Image (cartoon, helix red, strand yellow):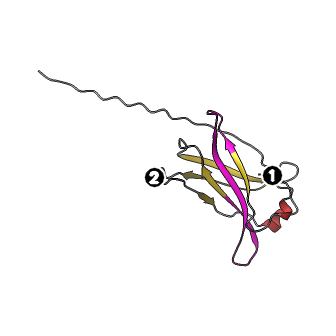
Amino acid sequence: METTEKCFARSRPVTGQSSFVWSLESFNTLKLGEIKSMLINSTFIEKPLLSMNLFLTADPNHEEQIQIEVLPICEEVMFYNFALSLLDISGNVANSIQGEIYFDSSKEQSVHRLPPFLKKISCLNIEISI
């Protein structure tokens, strides 16, 4: 008599997409080491997914450049695709970057630092929104 064993598995992938404008007040007075933070909320669960930190670092020529870090808050977040755009005062894209980041679930808290894509001086003639 032949016995067949069956195994079942179920996955519950959840995807979401959101878009927002982060208007940074007093961007022109932002100093090295000063951090502006924003929580990115989910469209499908009632808690924040990510925290985004914007701050300035100095490049090798001592010019201030915009640096952004993304920190997962919700343990269900495993990766994300992003498009990050600098908008001028009219809402038109002045500069942008895009990419994909995977979070390492073996680490207690993964911090992902996006590559710098703009110098502060180039933004001072543009009202910045991210």
- The image shows residue 10, relative to residue 95, as above or below, that is above
Q: Is residue 43 above or below residue 57?
A: above
Where residue 40 sits, quadrant-wise, is top right
Residue sitting farthest toward the bottom = 61
The quarter of the picture where residue 94 lies is bottom right
Circles 2 and 1: CB distance less than 8 Å? no
Residue 12 locus on image (x, y percent): 48, 32
x and y percentages locating residue 95 in the rendered image: 76, 57
Residue drawn 59% across the image and 57% down it: 112
Return the residue at label 1.
129
User: In the image, what residue occupies the spot 88% across and 49% down?
Assistant: 90
Q: Which residues are magenta?
A: 40-68
SS at circle 1: loop
Asked whether residue 45 is drawn in magenta, I would say yes
Q: Residue at x 45, y 33 (%)?
A: 11
Query: Which callout, 2 or 1, points at the residue further toward the start of the chain?
Result: 2
Amino acid under disc 2? Ser
Magenta part mainly helix, strand or loop?
strand
Q: Amino acid at mark 1?
A: Ser
Neighbor class of circle 1 (other Cα within 10 Å; few <14, some 14-19, many 20+) is: some
Please tell me in which quadrant of the rendered image residue 116 appears: bottom right
Q: Residue furthest top?
A: 1
Disc 2 target residue: 106
Compute the Cα span from label 2 to label 1.
Answer: 34 Å
Left or right, residue 38 beside residue 78: right
* The one of 40 and 99 positioned closer to us in this rendering: 40
